[in-house]
Amino acid sequence: MRNLFLFLWKYNFFISFLLLEVLCGYLIVQNNNFQRASFINSTNQVAAKVNSAVSSVTEYINLGITNDALSRENAAFKSLMPDVFYIDSAIRRVQSDTILKQQYTFMTAKVVNNTTNRRSNYLTLNRGSLQGVQPEMGVICPDGIVGIVKDVSDHYCSVISFLHKDSRISARLKKTNFIGSMVWDGFDATHGRLNDIEKHVKVNKGDTIITTSFSSIEQQALEEPLKNDR
Amino acid sequence: MIVKILAQLWRFIFLIGIQVVLLNHIQWSGYVNPYVYILFILMLPVETPKWLLLILALCTGLVIDMFGTSGGIHAACTVFMAFARPGVLKLIAPRDGYDTDTRLTPGVMGFNWFITYISIMVLLHHLAYFYIEVFRFSEFFMTFFKAIINSMITVALIVVGQYLFGRQGKRNERIIG
């Protein structure tokens, strides 16, 4: 017994190092687990406050880009308005409430913190459980999918970005309906990779890629155009 | 004693602030993200007890993890770096060892010594960080490339920062350095 204590004392530095690394390893595994909440995350009050202070400054710099995205989205919506189409038939479609049930509800949120330069990226949004956010909700933006909600606190939530090493989004080619899985290979935040498309399928530059309804986590049948990058 | 602790605390807050407010938001070319906050561990006095080194490294890493949603990765590799610090200091010790109260700045220790020390430690930290972050060997060389690039940028930032913000040693020592 005495020898054991002597041994522990002699190597106390190495042993405490090992213990701390095991603790960190536990935290990392905890964080990598999609289904479980992590202890150390950016939804706590201090981190989120600082991050939102920073983002309120950088917001102004990106105002032009945001404006462009919004007006593009507006144009897309306007082209769907009923008055845009010619009505050349006398039959009107009747929409009955028993058939058309509300499937999705939407909520706006501001990005408080966002990274694109790591291998696994996360966002922090300024909506939390008090506003009705729950883990595993889908997040979208005018340009397409963003990610999945992971941790939720009272006023903030953290989102697993599509730019994450474990993100796999079920996606298909809009024109030909061939299905693949969309991943990010870690270098360029503007380019993704659509895997598992058969060799014989013709893919042209500029083809649109949209999400499918196969993934249980993503919102079902969320049709969002993605850039074609195969 | 109190003054020394306050000085270290001030450096801690300053470096964490720089890291969180400025460097975490660099979006240059997609994979550049220098981690300058480790300078806090690197600049602790030589005679800091080893156990305190590990505890401080854990705290620093966890704070950075908290801000960046990286869940323990920074803590793991900062602790690893703190574990390596006494060994590295011994390895590159000057001929007559370290005096008590030595400040590990380029002004006091000399520029060559300082840049060797910083480079070794930053490389250790960044290699650990990027491999833990990716956690697979299928992207081995890309991860290696990222670690090297980011190490170089971090070392450059630290050296520039030392001359901009760091209090230098005595003026004559600075000329020698």
Image (cartoon, coloured by chain):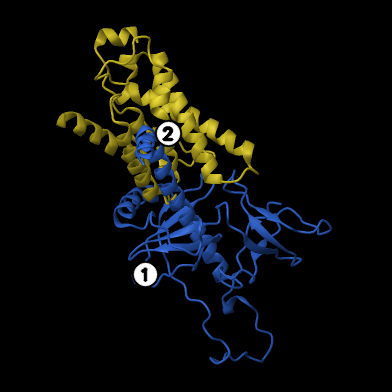
Chain colours: A blue, B yellow
- Judge left or right: residue B131 versus residue A67: right
Residue A120 percent coordinates (x, y): 52, 50
Q: Nearer the viewer, mark 1 or mark 2?
A: 2
Residue positioned 29% across, 53% down in the render: A46
In the depicted structure, whether residue B3 falls above or below residue A24: above
Question: In this view of the protein, which residue sits in the foreground, B78 or B152?
Answer: B78
* Residue type at numbered disc 2: Met
Local SS, label 2 = helix
* Residue type at numbered disc 1: Ser
Instruction: Tell me whether marks 1 and 2 sit on the same chain.
Output: no
In the depicted structure, whether residue B48 falls above or below residue A206: above
What distance separates the C-alpha of mark 1 from that of mark 2? 38 Å
In the depicted structure, whether residue A185 falls above or below residue B112: below
Question: In this view of the protein, which residue sits in the foreground, B139 or A57?
Answer: B139
Question: In this view of the protein, which residue sits in the foreground, A60 or A41?
Answer: A41
Residue B164 percent coordinates (x, y): 32, 23
Residue positioned 30% across, 54% down in the render: A49
The answer to whether residue B30 shows anywhere in this view is: no
Q: Label 2 crowding class (10 Å Cα cut-off): few <14, some 14-19, many 20+?
A: many
